[in-house]
Amino acid sequence: MRKRYTAQFKAQMVQEILKEEKTLNQLAAEHGVHPNQLKRWKAMALEGLPSLFSRNDQAAHTAAEHERQVTELYAEIGRLTTELAWLKKKAGLVAQS
């Protein structure tokens, strides 16, 4: 079974790596994580750093994601409303028999 690590744990490990007080292998041994996994987490963190400082990009992405969700939800409301109307009509036909 694969181990699952929390985002908080991963962030702490990357912080420890960036402090450079201990080697990657020391940290891996202390915390029971493979050194290659630590390298991947560090690379992911460093890749994501620029986006933390670009509020416009982040705000635009958040707004676009919100708009997509709203569109999907309105489409679902439309489908459900149509289905409900059909079911009501069908129930009325069944009740008349």
Image (cartoon, rainbow, N blue to C red):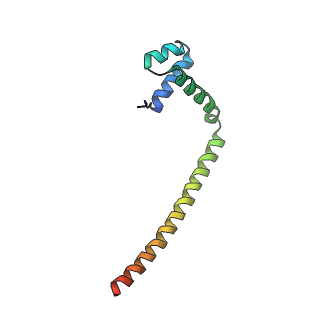
Q: Residue furthest bottom?
A: 97
Q: What is the quadrant of residue 44 in the picture?
A: top right
| Residue in the foreground of this view, choosing between 83 and 67 | 83
Residue under the point 63% across and 40% down: 55
Q: Position of residue 27 (x, y in %)?
A: 48, 16
The mark total stands at 0
Image coords of residue 66 (percent x, y):
56, 52
Q: Where 18 falls versus 90 (above or below)?
A: above
93 relative to 26 in the view: left or right: left
Which residue is drawn at the image coordinates 48% and 24% (left, top)?
12
Q: Is residue 74 left or right of residue 54?
A: left
22 to 54, vertically: above or below: above
Q: Residue at x 52, y 68 (%)?
A: 78
Where, quadrant-wise, is the C terminus in this rendering?
bottom left
The location of residue 87, given as percent across then percent down, is: 41, 75
Residue at the extreme front = 1
Query: Of residues 25 and 63, which is closer to you in this image?
Result: 25
Q: Where, quadrant-wise, is the N terminus in this rendering?
A: top left
**Can you tell which quarter of the image residue 52 is in?**
top right
* Left or right of 7 on screen, residue 94: left
Which residue shows up at 50% across the image and 23% down it?
13
* Residue 19 visible in rendering: yes
Residue 14 seen in the figure = no
Q: Quadrant of residue 57?
A: top right
Q: Position of residue 70 (x, y in %)?
A: 55, 58
